[in-house]
Amino acid sequence: MAKKRKAIITCAVTGAIHTPSMSRYLPVTADEIAEAGIAAAKAGAAVLHLHARDPKDGRPTQDPEAFRPFLEKIRKSTDAIINITTGGSPHMTVQERMRPAMTFKPELASLNMGSMNFGLFPMLQRFKEFKYDWEREHLENSRDLIFKNTYNDIESILTQGTKNGTRFEFECYDISHLYNLKYFFDQGLAKAPLFVQSVFGILGGIGPDPEDLMHMRRTAERLFGDQYRWSILGAGRNQIPLATIGAAMGSNVRVGLEDSLWIGPGQLAASNAEQVTRIRTVLEALNIDIATPDETREILQLKGADKVEF
């Protein structure tokens, strides 16, 4: 009998795109982030992708001390793989964005693979009322925002992270980002197996049409062959549909309130765990097993939870 395929579920618990006013379910404080992460892991997420927020107003922060409380709580309660952002917020400097990953030396960290326009302002058409002044400004200012990820930036993050034994979730928002990754792979700075997170539906990146997904898949296959592990991230309402299409084609999947606040048309997700449960149901209906954290460590060749510094 053929061996069933295993898929990795990543859950992006909270991030820099959405603001606290957009959903009462978005975790903001360290306790809320820890609770959300632990619940997502129990629901089946092998990887927890984590940002931090200022508990006073929910503003994204890369202060390592804002990460420490929820990292320690999650580590004590689950064996899930912790994936710390180096993306932070497009409004931050690269040096600022790198601080948590350099401090805590996680098994996995995110790495954006190219500079791009990063348009969040269309969300102002849906959300009209904001609790904090920074929220509206955060979205409006993205009309004139370049998310800076130069070759020097990427090389710096790759080099420093690799010295710490950290591997990377390579976030590719467009076709050019795959070619950037191929450059670093050919230079020996990015190591196989490459964990490629294809991101769809952010204004400034590739669109969310299934044809866009196919184009990313064909390009990655041609560039990397059997040297990469593929994952799908669909923003907003595209989260579950694109993850389903990708999973049917052999991909891993990413869900979470960082990427989408929704569980259905016009219906806010009540938790990260609800989204994990939904995509787990889809995977199991496709006769795909859910990879455990330890199986994921083997698939991605991670250093192990005993070698992090939190």
Image (cartoon, rainbow, N blue to C red):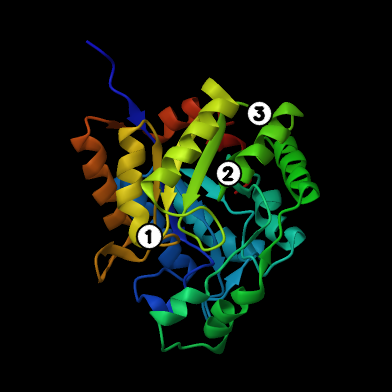
Q: Earlier in the sequence, mark 1 or mark 3?
A: 1
Q: Amino acid at mark 1?
A: Ala
Q: Nearer the viewer, residue 92 or 28?
A: 92
Residue 237 position within the rendered picture, expressed as x and y whole percent measured from the top left:
33, 61
Q: Is residue 6 above or below residue 236?
A: above
- When asked about the image quadrant of residue 65, the answer is bottom right
| Mark 1, residue position | 36
- When asked about the image quadrant of residue 78, the answer is top left
Q: Secondary structure at mark 1?
A: helix
* C-alpha distance separating marks 2 and 1: 32 Å
Residue found at the very far top of the displayed protein: 1
Residue 172 position within the rendered picture, expressed as x and y whole percent measured from the top left:
57, 46
Task: Look at discs 3 and 2 and give the one toward the viewer.
Answer: 2
Task: Look at discs 2 and 1 and give the one toward the viewer.
Answer: 2
Q: Earlier in the sequence, mark 3 or mark 2?
A: 2
Q: Secondary structure at mark 2?
A: helix
**Mark drawn on residue 175:** 2
The answer to whether residue 196 is visible is yes
Q: Nearer the viewer, residue 155 or 202?
A: 202
**Mark drawn on residue 191:** 3
Q: Nearer the viewer, residue 175 or 141?
A: 175
- Please tell me which residue is depicted at 55% across the width and 89% down the height of the picture: 133
